Image (spheres, rainbow, N blue to C red):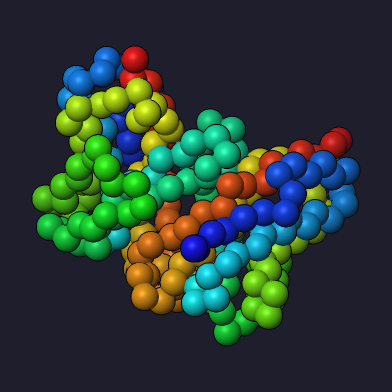
Amino acid sequence: GESVGLHLPTLSVQEGDNSIINCAYSNSASDYFIWYKQESGKGPQFIIDIRSNMDKRQGQRVTVLLNKTVKHLSLQIAATQPGDSAVYFCAENGLSSYDKVIFGPGTSLSVIP
Amino acid sequence: EAQVTQNPRYLITVTGKKLTVTCSQNMNHEYMSWYRQDPGLGLRQIYYSMNVEVTDKGDVPEGYKVSRKEKRNFPLILESPSPNQTSLYFCASSLKPLGQGFGYGYTFGSGTRLTVV
């Protein structure tokens, strides 16, 4: 069945270091992938997205990498800051049902000052 | 300020007592969706709507109803709440169908924490 999961449920990173959050997905038909950030007590916030015809996409301090061969998605955060502490979700969306989004269970990122 | 507004933020109710969680967005978005968030299960889609009067089931629609009579509002109705509906609920909206262009991921509300006793 379809699923979106994460390799590591928790991640602790020293402030200033780079963070890498990984995600595995099982639906090879997924066409669009999104990373969200959820801070405590708030709703998820859109970070960056990527389409299946791309390998990499960069935003401000964040980069998303997509490896369709092994169905793997990662979010890289450069120069991690305390404000980056949050739960990060990857999500996938398929062409056949463009509004149906499947979220992974999330990774908690803690930044050590 | 562009936002998705949910009310109430917190709600404790008893089994079987009908309730409605309201959701409103001021961004003229066509697409709206309801999710529930449970520990270890992540966010699961309950219902979504592609436009006024157009709604469809998500992954976990049982026990819920929705309506989309106006573009800006998308209320979630629990006709007869049960304890297994205790959860954190999020409403979300999007301008375009997801995947049609970049940066059109959902905008989420702040959540409604529902407890059914």
Q: Say above or below: B81 vs B3.
A: above
Compared across the picture, whether A67 is left or right of A95 comes to right
**Rendered-image quadrant of the C terminus of chain A:** top right
Residue drawn 53% across the image and 49% down it: A45
Position of residue B35 measured from the top left corner of the image (x, y, whole percent): 39, 45
Q: Which residue is outermost to the bottom?
A: A53
Residue A81, quarter of the rendered image: top right
Residue drawn 17% across the image and 31% down it: B79
Residue drawn 47% across the image and 46% down it: B43
B27 or B93: nearer the viewer? B93
A74 or A4: nearer the viewer? A4
Residue B19, quarter of the rendered image: top left
Position of residue B88 measured from the top left corner of the image (x, y, whole percent): 43, 33
Answer yes or no: is residue B62 visible: yes
Residue drawn 67% across the image and 54% down it: A6
Position of residue B96 measured from the top left corner of the image (x, y, whole percent): 34, 68
Q: Say above or below: A27 vs A52.
A: above
Answer yes or no: is residue B2 visible: no
Compared across the picture, whether B97 is left or right of A75 comes to left
Residue B75, quarter of the rendered image: top left
